[in-house]
Image: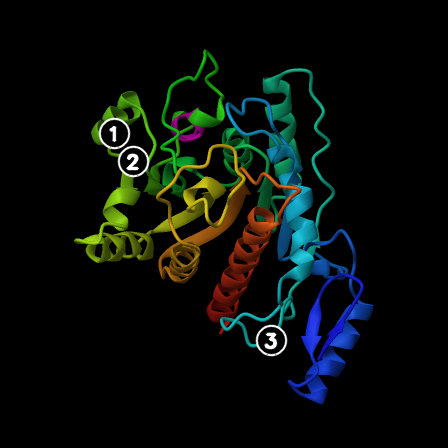
């Protein structure tokens, strides 16, 4: 038998009476519209969940502007327990869900400017930004660059696409140009994983530019030698030195986990490979993890798989970051 609350969380009464009481206490504290339903305590937040419902250059599937709201809604179903933490989330930390970006701006560049200011206003804590199409990355990096030397920054990019085009259909700030534009801003290094859809232009750029290291999905998932390539990837992530940002395009995962996203591509990463990447990044001894974005979340009214997967991964990002905080404070 299970006990249901009005917001969708369940708690099985056979666990223990103590756990049942904890869950009843938590239901009374549930705040609809907040990530994980967590109430917000006074004081400076340790983690801020930002919503950027931006979509102007999507070239295939539409609806990523609805992704942030759907992900926060789906997070009501996510458990607060993570084995990395000594207590359930928020584990003594302050997690804030900010008001969404207002979407104002008559042109693409005006909207990107608005995103830059929005992120800048919430950049004092560890930001986790929900998108929205991947084209927002350059605006995010402009905000990050106010406090971080971008030439010292490493971006870990989980993605089906290299996003290294100089332009797509005449637009240099297309979602297909996200990685190229942040390199133009001066980002020092990009480590890409899951790549399996790219143009000749992008292949040549990645091959000749020392700032880009790409691990192709076909190598990672190859039955012959894939384990070696995967170990090489985790080793590279664990050796990151200095500030690091995670940009997670949901199409980096296989479509079985994200059936609706901007441009789904078969042959992608598994959920657990993404989790292992996140945990490895968080534990990299010489890195300073400064934030993350999770983008191209396109909800599907016929099922909730994509947004629930996104909510689970955002929760893992938060948990892994807080676990690192606890370790560093010991």
**Residue visible at 50% across and 23% down in the picture:** 59
* Residue at the spot 29% in from the left edge and 35% down from the top edge: 211
Task: Answer with the quarter of the image where residue 67 lies.
Answer: top right
Q: Is residue 230 magenta?
A: no
Q: Which residue is mark 3?
A: 87
- Using the numbered discs, state the Cα–Cα distance from disc 3 to disc 2 in whole angstroms: 38 Å
Sort mark 1 into few (<14), some (14-19) or many (20+) by Cα contacts within 10 Å.
few
Tell me how many marks there are.
Answer: 3
Pick the quarter of the image with the N terminus: bottom right
Q: Examine the rendering and report whether any part of residue 195 can be seen.
A: yes
Dot 3 crowding, Cα within 10 Å, few <14, some 14–19, many 20+: few
x 58%, y 71%: residue: 81
Label 2: which secondary element:
strand
Taking depth in this image into account, of 288 and 181 the one nearest to the observer is 181
Q: Please, is residue 97 above or below residue 108 in the view?
A: below
Characterize the magenta stretch by its predominant secondary structure. Answer: helix
Q: CA distance from mark 3 to mark 1?
A: 44 Å
Q: Is residue 45 visible?
A: no
* SS for dot 1: loop
Residue 158: name its quadrant: top left
**In the rendered image, which residue does mark 1 sit on?**
209
Residue 196's place in the image compared with 105, above or below, is below
Q: Which residues are magenta?
A: 177-183
Instruction: Give the distance between the C-alpha atoms of the residues marked 1 and 2, in whole angstroms.
Output: 6 Å
Which label sits on residue 212? Answer: 2
Of 283 and 224, the residue lying toward us: 224
Q: Position of residue 185 (x, y in %)?
A: 43, 27
State whether residue 275 is above or below residue 213: below
The mark that comes first in sequence, 3 or 2, is: 3
């Amino acid at each position: 038998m299970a006990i249901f609350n009005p917001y969708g969380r369940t708690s099985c009464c056979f666990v223990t009476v103590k756990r049942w009481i904890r869950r009843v206490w938590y239901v009374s504290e549930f705040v609809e519209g907040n990530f994980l339903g967590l109430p917000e305590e006074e004081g400076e937040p340790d983690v801020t969940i930002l919503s950027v419902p931006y979509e102007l250059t999507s070239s295939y599937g539409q609806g990523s502007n609805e992704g942030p709201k759907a992900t926060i809604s789906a997070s009501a179903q996510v458990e607060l327990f993570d084995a990395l933490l000594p207590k359930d989330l928020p584990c003594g930390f302050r997690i804030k869900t900010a008001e969404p970006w207002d979407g104002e701006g008559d042109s693409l560049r005006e909207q990107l400017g608005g995103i830059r200011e929005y992120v800048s206003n919430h950049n004092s804590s560890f930001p986790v930004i929900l998108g929205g199409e991947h084209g927002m990355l350059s605006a995010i990096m402009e905000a990050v660059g106010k406090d971080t030397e971008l030439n010292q920054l490493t971006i870990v990019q989980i993605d089906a696409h290299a996003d290294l085009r100089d332009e797509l259909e005449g637009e240099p700030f297309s979602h297909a140009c996200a990685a190229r534009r942040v390199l133009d801003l001066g980002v020092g290094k990009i480590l890409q994983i899951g790549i399996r859809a790219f143009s000749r232009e992008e292949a040549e750029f990645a091959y000749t530019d020392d700032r880009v290291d790409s691990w192709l999905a076909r190598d990672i998932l190859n039955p012959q030698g894939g384990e070696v390539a995967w170990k090489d990837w985790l080793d590279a992530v664990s050796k990151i030195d200095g500030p690091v940002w995670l940009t997670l395009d949901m199409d980096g995962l296989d479509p079985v986990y994200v059936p609706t996203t901007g441009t789904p591509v078969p042959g992608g990463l598994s959920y657990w490979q993404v989790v292992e990447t996140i945990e490895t990044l968080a534990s990299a001894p010489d890195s300073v993890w400064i934030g993350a974005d999770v983008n191209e979340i396109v909800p599907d009214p016929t099922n909730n798989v994509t947004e629930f997967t996104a909510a689970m991964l955002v929760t893992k990002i938060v948990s892994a970051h807080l676990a690192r905080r606890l370790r560093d404070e010991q």
